[in-house]
Image: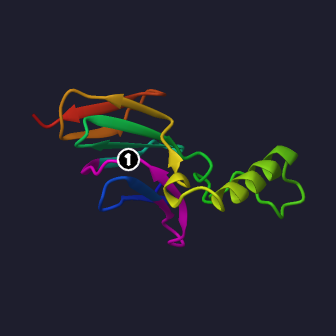
Amino acid sequence: QGKLIATASKQGTLIRVFSALTGERLVELRRGIDRAIVYSLCFNHDATLLASSSDKCTVHIFDTSAVAGGTGAVEHEDDPDASLAGRIYNFATAQLKTVLPKSMEARRSAMCFAVEEAPTVCAFGSQPNSILVAGMN
């Protein structure tokens, strides 16, 4: 859909998702804590999932459904129609950010699996919940 752009940090530990329309950073995702070369990043057809592959012989899948609409938050605190659970989540998240180290603020992958070789590239398949991973060797 072209509304989101994903980039990897130089160290390969963080993946940042930006709005293609505004350039605003919507979310920061943690691939791992060890340096890595990120070979590929790809969104599924509706940008609710993001896959990454790296030289660590792993593929990480991130849930990006909260930012797929371009908002970056589960619910807005100042929204009078926001659910109580959403307001509690946002409040707790804001409070935790004040005590956790910066490295813990990024969201972690929802799924990770190992592949036999690197480098690899990944892409979401046309079937629901399918991912294709191709090795270069």
Q: Tell me which residue sits at (88%, 54%) in the image.
A: 81
On screen, residue 124 above or below 37: above
In the rendered image, which quarter is residue 132 located in? top left
Residue under circle 1?
42
Q: Position of residue 134 (x, y in %)?
A: 22, 33
**Magenta stretch encompasses residue 32:** yes
Q: Tell me which residue sits at (62%, 54%) in the image.
A: 69
On screen, residue 38 above or below 117: below
Rendering colour mode = rainbow
Q: Tell me which residue sits at (51%, 36%) in the image.
A: 110
Residue 107 in the figure: left or right of residue 86: left
In the rendered image, which quarter is residue 15 located in? bottom left
On screen, residue 118 above or below 2: above
First to last magenta residue range: 17-39
Q: Which of 12 and 21 is in front in this view?
A: 12
Q: Position of residue 106 (x, y in %)?
A: 52, 53
Instruction: Report the quarter where the C terminus lies.
Output: top left
Residue 98 in the figure: left or right of residue 58: right
